[in-house]
Image (cartoon, rainbow, N blue to C red):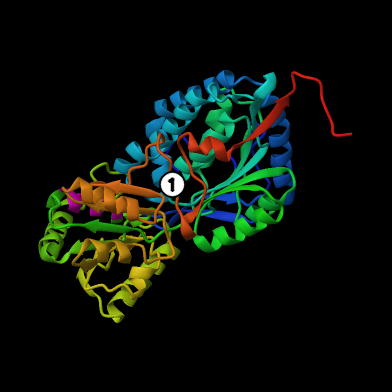
């Protein structure tokens, strides 16, 4: 594989690459060609045990470091990651198929942002003093949870590894991270960089595997916290398993997010928002605004401009060519799922206004797809597709748009385009979603909380909110007077 950042073994445990050929083979497929570019091994029970033991040992040491010392390591890791951004971006492109023009600005850079942000925050994590009557007082201590398990999704492997690891480590925890078996390479480099930056051996470990490995990690008594990014069905299983043992959880799951475009919106800006909400990363983003509600009077102009922009702007091709801006689907299974939804959309009466076809003889390419005449009861309007399929739904009134936007089991994201800011704030106040946008979509700065409501998840990633999910508060009552009792 012609890139310098290729990991040298399947797992990273206790500060070093580790191999165990006894584990099931995991083939890494380059989505642009379908070629197998690496073969890894799933973690055996011995590998899992070794990773958890290393994490527990390292966490005991790490917890004695000051927040400032821990932050220094995270910030150093961010600097290393930025210095190696191109190599890491090439690796991400091989892992996911995303265009290099995208990975250069959206993946390792986002991971570095998380490491830097939580590194800067680590030294500020303190308790509080609570004065009481008679001179007594309570003080609180913010303490780490212990060993945390992170389970990643296949669409943002570098980013997710850092989004979970950075707040966990800032709070004094250790982490064992299991990437998706579809994109297993990038998290190994995050672990390697953290160790190089000065993290104790074993503080951040990566083990490979499918669902059985995840289940073993989630249910192990050495684990205090589980953070998953994935689908709702997987989230249900992981949440239930963690809850059975009263473990802390963060669940960042799927969505079927609404994007509402009013007639007074700037047309090109709204089209840009819909492109970001549907076609960035070939549509493989959990927060995507795939139900695009367009006020009826501007629907024809919106659709025409969208098609014009796609015809003129989409460059599909070799993901390693920086001129390419639209890559393949990440794997053959997801491509087949998307093709199935496109067929369902046509069978149920939606109008295929653009795209919908496979492209080329190799790899997992499919055209950006637009459906019009979509109704709320159609499968493509109800179920998460996780591909470049945009559904246009007409509406007439603000009240109607809000009610229909919320008529879903999901609640990850929602957005509105309008020049009437009073209406914009009314809409986001009414959206049943954890992450909302006004006149933009799908931006996720590390300074802002990210997460969903309803079936889209539990807890928040990023921002100061994440600290609450990777630590717990201990209250200490201090008596300054003699202790009295009723008898």
Q: Position of residue 395 (x, y in %)?
A: 21, 67
Whether residue 6 appears in this view of the structure is: no
Residue 190 or residue 18, whichever sits in front: 190
The answer to whether 302 appears left or right of 9 in the picture is left
In this view, the residue farthest toward the right is 487
Q: Residue at point 15% right, 66% down? A: 296
The answer to whether 209 appears left or right of 462 in the picture is right
Question: Relative to 275, does residue 479 appear above or below in the rendering?
Answer: above
Which residue lies under the disc numbered 1? 156
Q: Main secondary structure of the magenta part?
A: helix
In this view, the residue farthest toward the front is 486
Question: Relative to 140, does residue 425 appear above or below in the rendering?
Answer: below
What segment is highlighted magenta in the picture? 269-277
Give yes or no for residue 276 being in the magenta stretch.
yes
Q: Residue at point 73% right, 50% down? A: 45
Q: Residue at point 22% right, 51% down? A: 423
Q: How many numbered circles does the render carry?
A: 1
Q: Residues within 10 Å of mark 1 (few under 14, many from 20)?
A: many
Element class at badge 1: loop
């Amino acid at each position: 594989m012609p890139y310098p950042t290729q990991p040298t073994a399947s797992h990273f445990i206790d500060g070093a690459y580790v191999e165990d050929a006894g584990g099931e083979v995991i083939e890494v497929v380059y989505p642009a060609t379908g070629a197998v570019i690496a073969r890894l091994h799933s973690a055996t029970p011995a590998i899992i045990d070794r990773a958890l033991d290393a994490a527990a040992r390292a966490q005991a040491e790490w917890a004695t470091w000051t927040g400032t010392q821990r932050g220094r390591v995270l910030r150093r890791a961010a600097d290393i990651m930025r210095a190696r951004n191109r190599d890491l971006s090439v690796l991400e492109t091989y892992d996911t198929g995303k265009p290099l023009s995208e990975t250069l600005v959206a993946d390792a850079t986002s991971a570095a942002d998380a490491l830097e942000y939580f590194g800067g925050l680590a030294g500020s994590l303190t308790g509080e003093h609570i004065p009481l009557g008679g001179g007594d007082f309570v003080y609180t201590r913010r303490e780490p949870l212990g060993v945390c398990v992170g389970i990643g999704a296949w669409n943002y492997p570098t980013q997710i590894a850092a989004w979970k690891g950075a707040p966990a480590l800032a709070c004094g925890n250790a982490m064992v991270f299991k990437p998706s078996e579809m994109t297993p390479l990038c998290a190994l480099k995050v672990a390697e960089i953290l160790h190089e930056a000065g993290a104790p051996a074993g503080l951040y470990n990566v083990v490979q595997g499918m669902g059985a490995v995840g289940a073993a990690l989630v249910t192990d008594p050495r684990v205090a916290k589980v953070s998953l990014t994935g689908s709702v069905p997987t989230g249900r299983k992981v949440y239930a398993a963690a809850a059975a043992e009263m473990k802390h959880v963060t669940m960042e799951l799927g969505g079927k997010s609404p994007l509402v475009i009013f007639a007074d919106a700037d047309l090109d800006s709204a089209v840009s928002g819909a492109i970001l909400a549907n076609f960035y990363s070939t549509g493989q983003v959990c927060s995507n605004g795939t139900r695009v509600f367009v006020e009826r009077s501007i629907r024809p102009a919106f659709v025409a401009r969208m098609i014009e922009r796609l015809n003129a702007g989409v460059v599909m091709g070799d993901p390693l060519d920086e001129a390419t801006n639209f890559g393949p689907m990440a794997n053959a299974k997801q491509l087949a799922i998307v093709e199935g939804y496109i067929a369902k959309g046509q069978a149920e009466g939606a109008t295929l206004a653009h795209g919908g076809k496979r492209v080329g003889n190799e790899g997992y390419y499919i055209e950006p797809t637009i459906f019009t005449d979509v109704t709320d009861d159609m499968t493509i309007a109800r179920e998460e597709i996780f591909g470049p399929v945009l559904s246009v739904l007409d509406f007439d009134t603000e009240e109607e748009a809000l009610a229909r936007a919320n008529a879903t089991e999901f609640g990850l994201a929602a957005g509105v385009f309008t020049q009437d800011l009073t209406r914009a704030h009314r809409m986001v106040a009414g959206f049943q979603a954890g992450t909302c946008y006004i006149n933009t979509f799908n931006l996720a700065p590390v300074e802002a909380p990210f997460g969903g409501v309803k079936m889209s998840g539990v807890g928040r990633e990023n921002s100061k909110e994440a600290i609450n999910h990777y630590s717990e508060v201990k209250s200490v009552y201090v008596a300054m007077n003699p202790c009295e009792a009723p008898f």
